[in-house]
Amino acid sequence: MSVTEQPPPASTPGPAPDGDAAAEQLRDRISADSLTTRRDYLRIVATVSGGLAVGGVGVAAGILHRHGDSENLPEPKKVTDVLAPGQSVAFRFPGEEDRAVAVRLADGTLVGYSAVCTHLACAVLWREDRGPEGELYCPCHEGVFDARTGEVTAGPPPRPLPRVFLTEQGDGSVWAIGTARSGEPAKDALCRQFGDAHPEFSAQMRCPGSDRAAEPERKRT
Ligand code: FES
């Protein structure tokens, strides 16, 4: 099943929230470090993704590949059929040269990051045996990143790991749906990638410029 082929929701949703309530709900979901296991958010993503003819997004950024450089919506990519707590999986996203890692933390939280160290681009590895809840570890110069946030906790890396947004299907499969630049707030990253193509999403998220985009609609009604 692709992300664009969603099963019907378990229950009929009520009236769509509006204004502050809708924005707050979405912010809560997005600020939870990962965009995971949220059926209704997945439906938003399905809507966002549906019908788009987007190709693979190449992230050509000189010597170092950097995640999140694209202004376009990456094509959703299946990462794995299932990911158990404590496990990780390496994958490529959004382009085939872009190393990434998905981790299921012990409490079930699903997180995804670029696996390219922000120091000198060595491969970052998941180490379940390190730290209170595992660490993302770069063996080249002992760089360490917080598994829950991607922030640097030790060593020379100058910036956090760029985030890869993940979501989970009802069948347990894990999908990559977007990226953020290093240190970029999730909302900004989502607005940049999803907002332009999908004004409803943009308005719900209160993305910059969404009011202007909606203005012609209001004038016609
Ligand atoms: Fe990762 Fe130096 S390349 S710490």
Image (cartoon, rainbow, N blue to C red):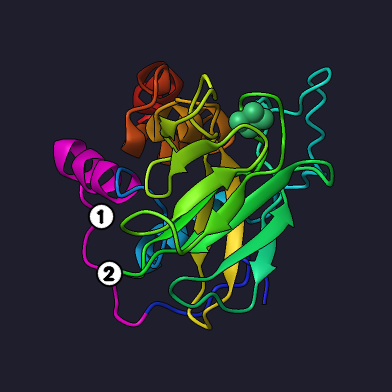
Q: Nearer the viewer, residue 62 or 205?
A: 62
Residue 168: in magenta span: no
Q: Nearer the viewer, residue 39 or 22?
A: 39
Residue 24: in magenta span: yes
Neighbourhood count class around disc 2 (C-alpha, 10 Å): few under 14, some 14–19, many 20 upward: few
Q: Quadrant of the C terminus?
A: top left
Residue 16: mark? 1
**Element marked by disc 1:** loop
Q: Nearer the viewer, residue 97 or 160?
A: 160
| Residue 71 x %, y % | 65, 25
Q: Residue at x 45, y 51 (%)?
A: 135
Q: Quadrant of the N terminus?
A: bottom right
Give the residues in magenta. 10-30
Residue 13: mark? 2
Q: Amino acid at mark 1?
A: Ala
Discs 1, 2 touching: Cβ within 8 Å: yes
- State the CA–CA distance, disc 1 to disc 2: 8 Å
Mark 2 C-beta to ligand 1 under 8 Å: no
| Residue 161 x %, y % | 53, 34
Q: Is residue 25 above or below residue 144?
A: below
| Residue 132 x %, y % | 31, 57
Is 37 situated left or right of 112 in this image?
left
Neighbourhood count class around disc 1 (C-alpha, 10 Å): few under 14, some 14–19, many 20 upward: few
